[in-house]
Amino acid sequence: MRALDLDYMLGLVPVILGYVPLTLFMAGAGMVLALILGALLAVERVAKVPVLDWFVVLFISFFRGTPLLVQLFLFYFGLPQILPSLTQIDGVTAAIMGLTLHFSAYMAESIRAAIVGVDRSQWEAAQSIGMTQGQMMWRIILPQAARVAAPTLVNYFIDMIKGTSLAFTLGVTEMMGAAQKEAAGSFLYFEAFLVVAIIYWVIVEILSQGQKRLETHLNKAFVR
């Protein structure tokens, strides 16, 4: 059994760290877009607009029921066969699209549950002062639902960061892609993948600590 090549691992750390901004960019862009789309889907699920609701249910079912990797391949390799104009889409854009649609389906259900969980008295109070459905949702219901859904949404962001590792299958050189290239050149696969695993781990732990602080802050007003 050979010993780990620690010098190689230490030299690889700055190389992998150089791709952290791209990883965070894909996850951040995907998170913002998924949050917007997920909120719209959740509001529709609560409102249950005829016909539209059927399409939303189908959308959520499909993207929750199929692997992210399959969805990425569909966007990047499959759709251009049907829509040739999509051949111009690069791997980063395809990865962000895949992350957005995949995680928006999960966020929609979490936000919907948080909206439904808001006490009915809040809905009735808003209606009693003449608020429209849109005003009530924007000013009263969604802010309260956001407090409940926030910890779960942060978990999805963490999952999204880990999900960016699949982007290397689309030819994107992010952290996992960089580790794969370095390992292929040195044949030190264990060391290369261990380094990238530790870096992912550190990022996730930092975000997990931030999540705990956020949860404490949001619940502070409700602690008696």
Image (spheres, grey):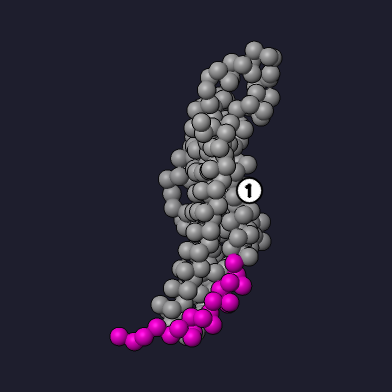
Which residue lies under the disc numbered 1? 32
Magenta-colored stretch includes residue 158: no
Q: Position of residue 174 (x, y in %)?
A: 57, 68
Callout 1 crowding tier (Cα within 10 Å): few <14, some 14–19, many ≥20 = some
Residue segment shown in magenta? 1-20
Looking at this view, name the residue that lies furthest to the left. Answer: 1
Q: Secondary structure at mark 1?
A: helix
Q: Is residue 80 above or below residue 173?
A: above
Q: Position of residue 48 (x, y in %)?
A: 54, 25
Magenta-colored stretch includes residue 13: yes
The answer to whether residue 108 is seen in the rendering is: no
At horizontal 54% and vertical 32% (from top left) the residue drawn is: 222
Give the side of residue 66 with respect to residue 222, left or right: left
Q: Nearer the viewer, residue 67 or 145?
A: 145
Q: Is residue 6 above or below residue 99?
A: below
Q: Amino acid at mark 1?
A: Val
At horizontal 56% and vertical 73% (from top left) the residue drawn is: 16
